[in-house]
Amino acid sequence: MSKRPFIAANWKMNKTVRETTDFIRALSQTARTVMDRDIIVAPPFTALYAACDAARGTSIRVAAQNLHWQDNGAYTGEISAAMLTDVGCDYVIIGHSERRRLFAESDIDINRKLAKALAVGLKPIFCIGETLEEREAGQTLTVIGRQIKEGLNKLSRGDIESLVVAYEPVWAIGTGKTASLAQAGDAHRAIRREIEVLYDADAAAALVILYGGSVNPENIGALMAEPDIDGVLVGGASLDLASFIKIIHFDKT
């Protein structure tokens, strides 16, 4: 199934409000000329309102980088799903490997976050992936299978229609290393098979699956030529406007 390429920028803990608005306003010029692909930007929480304002009237969509599964309460430092929709977010990244590794988020936590995001109409970008130790131990498919099953626990077939999955091998994030095309392709096919088992073949075929892990202008074309890779989740290379524009304008090789 041919899908619109999905190009998402995860800025992590980078960019001020001014830097965010300047970037999005400049990016909007490119977005006008590339109408056959989806462009998503995920700034830090402090810049979300400004990002949504700057993106208004353009084809650029804004994602948050995280949320809490509770609606409100004594959760100092957390942000609710309703707060994200209130500022205008369409997407939210959930389960990024840095959240799992640095902040000890479990599959149960991630499942709660996915359910809450979907309940308020946010589209989750659900991140999964193995560590280097898990890959070297031959556990890649076991790990991503567990993350999918536990992360999507009790989510309906209808919920899956609003979901984007991002495969991000942890050993390739911010390291300059990229999974080989064979490694990435195998993982993406395994994800699609898992969704087919849990739901059905149509859901698996329609699912948008992204690759994340040291994506850059030099490797984007080859990655996007893989039949089961529908888009990318870009980290460091998305912080520079010229670099991100080159990624958006990729040509399949």
Image (cartoon, grey):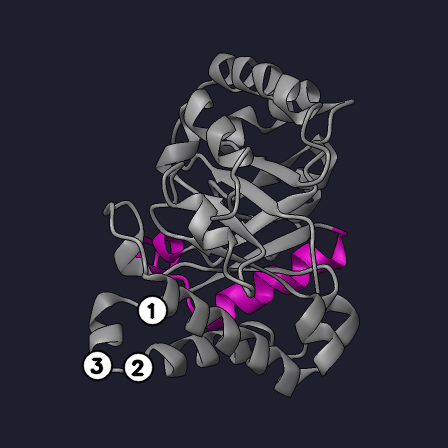
Mark 1 highlights which residue? 130
Task: Classify 10 Å Cα crowding around label 1: few (below 14), some (14-19), many (20 and above).
Answer: many
Q: CA distance from mark 2 to mark 3?
A: 5 Å
Circles 2 and 1: CB atoms closer than 8 Å: yes
Q: In the shown orientation, is residue 105 left or right of residue 55?
A: left
User: Three-letter amino acid code at disc 1?
Assistant: Glu
> Which label was assigned to residue 137?
3
Tell me the residue at 49%/69% (across/down): 188
User: Three-letter amino acid code at disc 2?
Assistant: Gln
**Secondary structure state at the residue bearing disc 2:** loop
Q: Is residue 131 above or below residue 6?
A: below
Q: Is residue 19 above or below residue 193?
A: above
- Check the image and name the residue furthest to the front: 253
- Check the image and name the residue furthest to the bottom: 197
| Quadrant of the image occupied by residue 165 | bottom right
- Dot 3 or dot 1: first in sequence order is 1
Residue 115 x, y percent position in the rendering: 66, 64
Circles 2 and 3: CB atoms closer than 8 Å: yes
Tell me the residue at 61%/15% (across/down): 25
Residue 67 x, y percent position in the rendering: 56, 49
The range drawn in magenta is 97-121
User: Three-letter amino acid code at disc 3?
Assistant: Ala
Residue 46 x, y percent position in the rendering: 51, 26
**Secondary structure state at the residue bearing disc 3:** loop
Mark 2 highlights which residue? 139
Foreground: 102 or 188? 188
Total numbered badges shown on the rendered structure: 3
The answer to whether residue 88 is seen in the rendering is yes
